[in-house]
Amino acid sequence: MQRFSPQQAESHAIARNLSTRVAVAVIGIPFILFLAYVGGFAFIALVVVIGTISLVEFYRMSKYTGARPQTVLGTLSGVLVMLSFAGKRIENLVVGASISAGSALPFPSPLQMMSFAIFGLMLLALIIELFRREGLPFVNLGATVLGVFYVAFLLGTLIGIRELFPAEFPVHRFFPEVVGIAVPESIQNKINQWGGLTVVSLFVTIWMCDTAAYFVGLTIGRHSLFHRVSPKKTWEGAVGGFVFAVLTSFVLQKLLIPYLTSVDAIVIGAIVGVFGQVGDLIESRFKREAGVKDTSSLIPGHGGALDRFDSLIFVSPIVYLYLDFIVFR
């Protein structure tokens, strides 16, 4: 039986894990990017599934800390919160179907949907906790509500980004030839295409940041970034991830999303390079508190859904606000 030194064993484990990660990525990445590009209910369903799994993983992880979250109520509320970011699309589908059936039905606005989910969560969670004899109410309620906001609300903004196109897109600023409110179908298709490419570019930029941070840290990393939370992360890796995020965003803007300026691309790259890595550290802090290495073993070589999309959870809301309030102002 061949014996390996500790260094050889570690290198062998890294290589084996890397090959598994690559194999999964080869299958998963094209699928995710295709749905992001297509948009509509297919992409909404993808985000809701990822968010739901991530939320369940978060609740399961919180139990290792002594919390007893209200998993069913929290998950249902989280799904409704995520769907509220697609409220207009859902309203058009439901109201259109009701008109075709001969009776127009009232439908809540996106804000009303989200308010119902949040207020309903708070009221029901408080009432349920009144009768529970499991765990501590403060801790249980904290984990339940935090899961909805940390996972569902923040990740739901990814749906919000995709739904900005063409709903909130300033058509007349980017297409001055359009007169009045009637937008030609060709321009609507172009705007929708830009929306898909924007989300695709966001995914690619995050993945490039993560990959660069990993390999730069593995190769030349010497100075610990945040040893108490994630001992293997280094400042060298973090800087490498940041630089590659900015460069990737800049290149993709030139190739795919011309409605953005070079400054916009650099800002979005910087958002990914900083807050994507902050999101990863925050999730590492949760895992360290819970005493787990991964949130689950759902994705071979990658851990759980929350492990894989923790950066996206933090990046999406900031990019959403930047696009809606700065780029589309």
Image (tube, grey):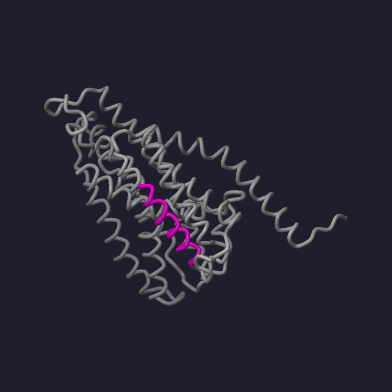
On the picture, is 169 further left or further right than 252? Answer: left
- Quarter of the image where one finds residue 116: bottom left
- Quarter of the image where one finds residue 47: top left
Residue 228 against residue 59 in the figure, above or below: below
Q: Nearer the viewer, residue 3 or 140?
A: 3
| Image quadrant containing the C terminus | top left
Q: Residue at x 49, y 46 (%)?
A: 207
- Where residue 166 sits: x, y (%)? 26, 34
- Count every numbered label the image shows and give the total: 0
Magenta segment main secondary structure: helix
| Image quadrant containing the N terminus | bottom right
Residue 5 against residue 298 in the figure, above or below: below
Q: Which residues are magenta?
A: 268-287
In reply to whether residue 251 is colored magenta, the answer given is no
On the picture, is 106 further left or further right than 246? Answer: left
Q: Nearer the viewer, residue 163 or 262?
A: 262
- Where residue 17 sits: x, y (%)? 65, 50
Residue 246 against residue 137 in the figure, above or below: above
- Where residue 143 sits: x, y (%)? 41, 67
On the picture, is 86 further left or further right than 274? Answer: left
